Image (cartoon, grey):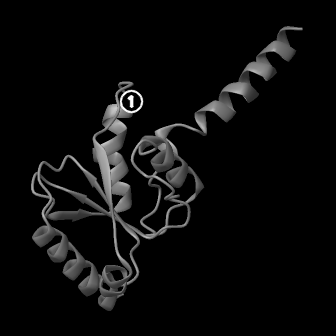
C-alpha cells in the first residue's frame, strides 16, 4: 500500500512540475512552443482580444524605454521566472505588428515587452530595424 501511494505521488507531482516556468524559454527559437504560447495567452488574456500566441514569431523587448532586444531564454529567465517563483505576476504587454511591419521585421508577428516604462512609435521602428538586421544575418 505504501509503495502504491508513493508511486501515485511521484507520478502526480512529476506531471505538475512539467507545467512550471522552468520549462519556458528552453531554446531561442523565435517561434513559441506550446508551453510558451499557453503562458503568454494566460498572462495577456485581458488584452490580447483574439490573438493566440501559438506558433507566433515573437521578439522580446525590455529596458525602461523598450530599446533592448533579448533572447527568448533570457526573457523567461530574467523577466518572468523571478516573479512567478514568488507567486507574483510579471509586468508584460505586447504590440502586434501590422502586415507591413511584419514584412519589414523579417516575419515577426508580435513584440512582447516587459518592464518597459514608455514605448513610442519611434522606438518601435528602431526595434523593427534591429529585427530586420538580425533576420538578414541568419
Q: Residue at x 81, y 13 (%)?
A: 5
Other residues around mark 1 within 10 Å, as few (<14) / some (14–19) / many (≥20): few
Side of 135 relative to 28 (left or right): left
Q: Residue at x 68, y 34 (%)?
A: 15
Side of 101 relative to 3 (left or right): left
Percent x, y for residue 126?
15, 75
Percent x, y for residue 78?
28, 46
> Image quadrant for the C terminus?
bottom left
**Depicted 76 relative to depicted 122: above or below:** above
Looking at the picture, tell me which residue is in the foreground, 95 or 106: 95
Residue furthest to the top: 1
Percent x, y for residue 118?
11, 53
Side of 70 relative to 22 (left or right): left
Mark 1, residue position: 85
Q: Residue at x 49, y 59 (%)?
A: 51
Side of 104 relative to 124 (left or right): right
SS of the residue under disc 1? loop
> Image quadrant for the N terminus?
top right
Q: Quadrant of residue 132?
A: bottom left
Amino acid at each position: 500500500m505504501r509503495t502504491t501511494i508513493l508511486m501515485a505521488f511521484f507520478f502526480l507531482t512529476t506531471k505538475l512540475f512539467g507545467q512550471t516556468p522552468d520549462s519556458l524559454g528552453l531554446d531561442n527559437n523565435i517561434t513559441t512552443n506550446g508551453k510558451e504560447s499557453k503562458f503568454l495567452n494566460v498572462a495577456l488574456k485581458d488584452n490580447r482580444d483574439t490573438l493566440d500566441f501559438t506558433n507566433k514569431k515573437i521578439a522580446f523587448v525590455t529596458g525602461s524605454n523598450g530599446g533592448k532586444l533579448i533572447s527568448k531564454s533570457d526573457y523567461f529567465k530574467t523577466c518572468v521566472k523571478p516573479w512567478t517563483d514568488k507567486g507574483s505576476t510579471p509586468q508584460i504587454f505586447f504590440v502586434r505588428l501590422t502586415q507591413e511591419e511584419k514584412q519589414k521585421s523579417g516575419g515577426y508577428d508580435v513584440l512582447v515587452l516587459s518592464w518597459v516604462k514608455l514605448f513610442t512609435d519611434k522606438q518601435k521602428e528602431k526595434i523593427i530595424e534591429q529585427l530586420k538586421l538580425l533576420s538578414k544575418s541568419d
